Amino acid sequence: MFISFLIAYGQQILRYGPTILCLLTGTFLQGQNSLNDCSGAIEVCGNGAISSNATGVGLQEIGSNACSSMEHHSLWVKIEVTRPGTLGFTLTPTSRNLEIDYDFFIFGPNASCGNLGTAIRCSTTNPLASGQSDNLTGMNELETETSEGPGTQGNSFVKSLDVLPGESYYIVIDRPIGQSPFDLEWTGTSTLEGSPFPEGVEVNQPNDLIECGVSGSVDFNIFSTGGQITSQPQTLIEYYAELAHAVDRVKELPAVYTSTIPRKTIYARVENLLTGCSQIVNFDLVIPPGPEIATQITVEGCDLDRDGIEIFDLDALQQEILQDLSPKDHTIEFYRSLQEAQNGLVAVNSLQNSSGGTFFARVRKSDGSGCYSISSLELNLISPGNLADLPTENLRIKVASKRIAVPVTPGFDYAVNSPNGPYFTGPDLRDVPPGMNTLYIRNADLCEIGTLKILVPEFPAAFSPNNDGVNDNWFVSTGNYPVLNRPVRVFDRYGKLLWEFRVNAGNWDGTLDGHDMPADDYWFEFSLPEDLVLRGHFSLVR
């Protein structure tokens, strides 16, 4: 099986294989010998079939010939013979227009570029001038002359070569008139039992290498394709990043190649070490795209307790990271560094107690391909703003004995005497110490926090005045916060004033005019600062 490949030199494209060469135009990269010159001659291997278009002229090297011509648009070909017999060829222009005129010259056997000698075969017949019905040219066993032309002379064909193994020849194909590619087919008895030229390289088209990566970067082991490319003994495989490098054999690649584009073509030059014949095949390094996720997300955490640390729930970012992708088709892991995310090492918990910084989410397809993408998560810890201090009555906050009743408002939490909490959503905050307390109010959604000073009293819900020394008096206390001249009034169920005393300075022993009052519910009222009047009831137990 023969595999061809393309070489691009500016406007020139060469199709090489062990059997095929296709030349369309004639400009060359620096460092590459011109195919228009002897030193740049194409060495034929395999069955030697050539498909080309001689274009441009290099040095005038034809020298002595019996066909009275020189180079116009020339292509040099070198053949080495491995089988004896006759050797001819038929050159067929792609265009059958008779204005297309191809000539050829042959030097040898065993000529060298510096000592070509006289052409042993040549044909410069012009198809139109000689009245031919086609524009083919070449050598065959029916002809007897070794040269013909120019112009009107001959029929464009000359006698085949008699060749022996080990001989080499240079063939110059020239096109003085017109523009058309051509095909060249070898003929003669030396071709009957196989190719008369050195064995080519047995190559196969390798599969592309496909590796998932991130940010378009993957290390590929390009040498792993060697077994696919050829199993032929005595062969050498070299790898190149550019086709011109493979042709000139410069900048050979090591085994590991780092690709940074979604699809990169690598060129493998395969040489038969016994014959020197070579061929270039190519394959692609493919980096499939990972999941299409948000590449960067900024998360703000509110430091409501002002301790410089906040809990960030990275799992809560799942849908923002995935965008329109389905969570069931993807796996998300979190990492502290980009390198750890790329290598899939040391994943961290999704709940992070952090002062801020950058984390990375690795999102992997669940289809087994292993392709993944990475999203950068920027965690910003911000200090809370000030929640406007609101009057107590606007917040509808109520106080009772060692209790504060707060409204249940979405987004608001409350804590007593500590900005670090614990925080409650309400409504009842119990076991509040009597006296002046600080109520912390925060709104996590707005990252705001405020405070209120609230005076909380203490008074028993019941008392038993039986002189046992336990709970014998009913009182009202504001702890160590002084409240001057604030009267407490006690009423029976009918509203009759029974007793009056001062907050923190008196009490009621359950009597009126020296007589014990009956067990019953009694009512009270007293005023606190800011004219807040507290009313309620308590029980006297006998």
Image: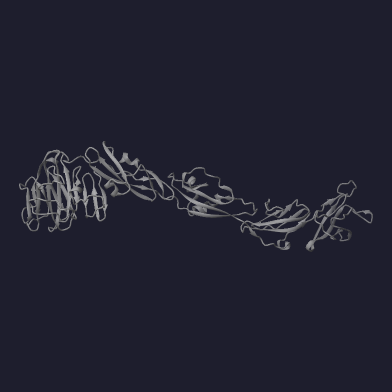
Which one is in front, 172 or 282?
172
Residue found at the very far front of the displayed protein: 114
Compared across the picture, whether 162 is left or right of 363 comes to: left
User: Does residue 202 appear anywhere in the picture?
Assistant: no
Percent of width and height locating residue 97: 14, 58
Compared across the picture, whether 88 is left or right of 350 comes to: left
Compared across the picture, whether 101 is left or right of 360 comes to: left
Residue found at the very far right of the displayed protein: 514
Percent of width and height locating residue 13: 24, 53
Name which residue lies at 18% across and 43% down.
47
Percent of width and height locating residue 102: 13, 54
Q: Is residue 413 above or below residue 20?
A: below
Residue found at the very far top of the displayed protein: 233
Quarter holding residue 81: top left
The quadrant the N terminus occupies is top left
User: Does residue 37 appear anywhere in the picture?
Assistant: yes
Name which residue lies at 17% across and 45% down.
78
Percent of width and height locating residue 499: 89, 58
